[in-house]
Image: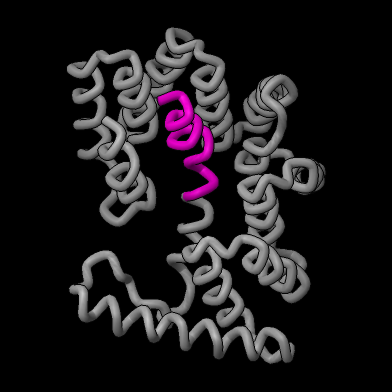
Amino acid sequence: MKAFIATAVASGAMLCALYCVSSQSVGAVPNLSTQTAEQEEKDSIIIEETERFLEGQFHSDQCEVEGLKTLMEIKVKNKKIPEAIEVLSKLTQVEPGEVEWPLMRSHLHAYNGDYEIAKNGFSELLKIDPFRVEAYHGLDLGFIGKKIEEAIKLCKKENKKSESRDFKLLLAQIKIIESRYDEALKAYEELVKEEPRDFRPYLCQGVIYTMLRKNKEAERNFEKYRRLVPRGHPYASYFNDNMMANR
């Protein structure tokens, strides 16, 4: 269960970052989630053909940005992580001002076990943008806690309320990983008081209560989460696929 918590809560941002960007890619890749078996087979063939075509363009330097996004999406979904990293490196060259590509590349390095490369990538990103919450996920817990507290103070000073909230959520996630569940619950309760329409604290509280075998409290928070999470949001599918399977 602890391994699941680390994946569902601390690494959830990584997965959402990947699939949020993937969902914005061009429509060459069909959505297989609601297809029949026959349709899935046909769409799988289309995806394979799309991948081969885009790979040919990629290796001949003829692939445009939208094609690179689609190719990266296919590689990630097929768990061809080294190849996805290669495509992201190309996207970084094509769009040097777009920070999403090096951010995703660092996340994939971490996912692939290349932690030192990932850490260096996250550190470089934070030099450019210290408010980039997603980049803090790749740093060591002891170091990250201090950095987040500094970032929260900076957010308060510059009146960046949204960024401050994201950092507070991340700090609470660290408490979960460190098994400081009472402190994490208290932090989420404060976040609910600040903004009761944000679905994220309810989801995280539900996860903690599930882990503590307090099923009534867990279901109460999950119900609030389900009521508030936007339809089609990446968290919704991630919750359905992973959380419900582990309850």
- In the displayed structure, does residue 22 sit left or right of residue 88? left
Q: Quadrant of the C terminus?
A: top left
Give the residues in magenta.
1-15
Residue at horizontal 52 percent and vertical 33 percent from the top: 10
Residue 56 visible in the current orientation? yes
The verdict on residue 4 being magenta is yes
Q: Position of 224 compared to 63: left or right?
A: left
> Is 203 placed above or below 90 here?
above
In the figure, residue 171 lies in which quadrant? Answer: top right
Q: Nearer the viewer, residue 128 or 29?
A: 29
Q: Give the tally of numbered discs.
A: 0
**Between 137 and 128, which is closer to the camera in this rendering?**
137
**Spot occupied by residue 170 in the image (x, y as percentages of width and height):** 55, 29
Question: In the rendered structure, does residue 131 fall within the stretch colored magenta?
Answer: no
Residue 139 percent coordinates (x, y):
71, 33
For the residue pair 48 and 16, the one nearer the viewer reads as 48
Q: Is residue 173 above or below residue 99?
A: above
